[in-house]
Amino acid sequence: MAGQEQQQPKSRDTEVDEDVPAAPPAPAEGQASAATQGVDDLLDEIDGVLESNAEEFVRAFVQKGGQ
Amino acid sequence: MTAGVSGKPAGVSGGLPVGGAMRVMGSETEYGIHAPSAPGANATMMSARVIQAYAQVTRQRAAGGAETRWDYTDEEPLHDARGWTLERSQADPDQLTDQPPVLDAEAVALAYGRQELEADGEDESGTLLMNMVLGNGARLYVDHAHPEYSSPEVTSPLDAVAWDAAGDLVALAAVRRLAADPELPPINLYKNNTDNKSVSYGSHENYLMPRNVPFGDIVRGLTPFFVTRQIICGAGRVGMKQDGSRPGYQISQRADFFETEVGLETTIRRPIINTRDEPHATADKYRRLHVIIGDANLSQASNYLKFGATAMVLSLIEAGLAPKLEVHEPVAALQAVSHDTSLTATLRLLDGRRITALDLQWIYYEAAAKHAQDTGVADAVDGDGHTHQVLERWSATLTELGSDRAAAASSVEWLAKLSLLEGYRDRDGLDWGHARLGLVDLQWADIRPEKGLYYRMLARDRMQRLVDDATIQRAVTEPPSDTRAFFRGRCISRFGADVVGASWDSVIFDVPGRGRLQRVPTREPLRGTEALTGGLFARHREAGPFLSELLGLPPGS
């Protein structure tokens, strides 16, 4: 999915101006409807997205207090 | 608002249709923050990095220090809605949110190194950037040990969804910026509410209400609703108990962290009904109801119902029409509801009845629907344009939860997450204590679309969209047109170099040539709109003449 990572637009100079950050990618055109997508297909994709070494990653996610 | 921003005096509803889902509201999201390659990094410092990265993205700093300081003048975190003020000496340090946070220099140095801090960790005035007011009217700042996005004020649940989701794009832009810097460890942000190790951080809602509604009515009317609201908008959580030590799956991220029914605190002894009384508006007319019990939602449909149904229940309470029922031991009931994904457990009411969470939500729905029909706001054609849709979705969701859970999985966040987790459990034979399921839960909330599992589901149309991507994108830079956020946001984007501070109810200018700072109060949330101030912004490109007209001063004074 790295190819979907978008470049931040170059800044314009003097104006106070907010560059528009990247939006989540839109679903691919012509993609089959959700109803026909198999769960296996979904899990296969997510297998490739999940951080490696689940146990260590989850253990290291330690937060300080919040509201 | 001051002279020059004339208009009808705002009533308590401020001219918004009364009785339905419209009201002044907003969201706050504290993001979970994690640098996998720098596990010991100071969370407050990392959060400041996030704010700074976004300032770089917006180039506000290059334009002259327009990353506006927060004006703390009107912060009153110790005012209790029940009618008293907590002694400062009795408060937990976390409650003193009316002071700028102080970053300990040692902590900073520990996290990022002294040299780097001296190089670029400070702005021109020598302080770390902890606070920004954005061109869309939002606030982006370091709250405790998390970056927080507080949305601008909006008037409808659909706008609440759009400007809340815009915050996720703001956070994403900061994450991208940091990832592109080879000198810094990449930082991940998560739109969730717990680390599953006994820490929780909030996602808050704010609703404007008339001051004259007795607070006791709010407590009585809201508590049963809040105990059960999670079935339509819980985000789902792998793990039970505050530290997640008991394996399992529950409906709410937050439920296990609530310990009391009513109270002022937000970080300790968390209450179902929070009593912080900081109206950020004309105090004798309004209260700002601060809701701390919700989960952060990525699902647009869940977020929409969270704001829409709650706004309608507040309308019921204001009309004295809230359902007359009381839940026995609400905190225990809140947790029991969260732990019952079958939705079959019954709650005991004080009158002896036993009903399910779903039954209780239907009771609130029926009352809200009747009131909205009686006041006319629910009419599909002549109504307020929002309440009809909220009622349709609310009833459809409750119906699905009762009879077609597969259909609800594309809208109700806890069910969507559960369907993914069940997929893994079935395929790989995992029990609830397996680390991969914990990772799925955590990574569901990663705000990067290529890593966040919610976004992977969205890309496959397994989650419903209520607001299209272009609208969310626009909300990153554009303020809502129909609240004072328009004035605030436009002041920042137009006159940022001359704005030295801002808050929910003020914008402070320092215009060259004027002897003193000019504080423009914005204490009426429904003034400062595009309709009232758009012409003023159109007429002036410079802050001096703009202020002169706004404040009725002679030019150049």
Image (spheres, rainbow, N blue to C red):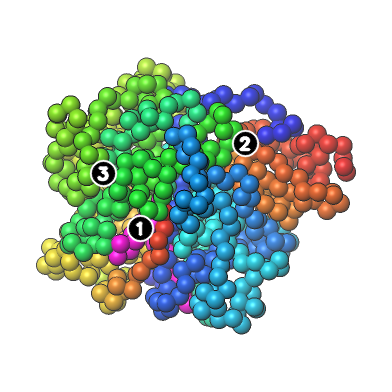
Disc 2 and disc 3: Cα gap in Å?
35 Å
Q: Secondary structure at mark 1?
A: loop
Residue B216 visible at all: yes
Task: Tell me: residue B305, above or below residue A31.
Answer: above
* Amino acid at circle 1: Ser
Closer to us: B406 or B370: B370
Q: Counting other residues with Cα less than 10 Å from the Cα at mark 2, is it few (<14), some (14-19), or many (20 or more)? A: some
Between circles 3 and 1, the one closer to the viewer is: 3
Does label 2 lie on the same chain as label 1? yes
- Residue that mark 1 sits on: B200
Mark 1 belongs to which subunit?
A: B
Q: Which range of residues does the magenta coloring cover? A: B185-203
Which residue occupies 62% across, 41% down? B505
Q: Is residue B150 above or below residue B371?
A: below
Q: How many marks?
A: 3
Occupied quadrant, residue B385: top left
Residue assigned mark 3:
B331
Which residue type does callout 3 highlight?
A: Val
Specify the quadrant of the image occupied by residue A50.
bottom left
Tell which circle, 3 or 1, labels the residue nearer the N-terminal end: 1
**Residue B167: in magenta span:** no
**Mark 3 packing: few (<14 Cα in 10 Å), some, or many (20+)?**
many
Chain ID at mark 3: B
Q: Say what amino acid the circle numbered 2 marks.
A: Arg
- Kindly tell me whether residue A3 is visible in this rendering: no
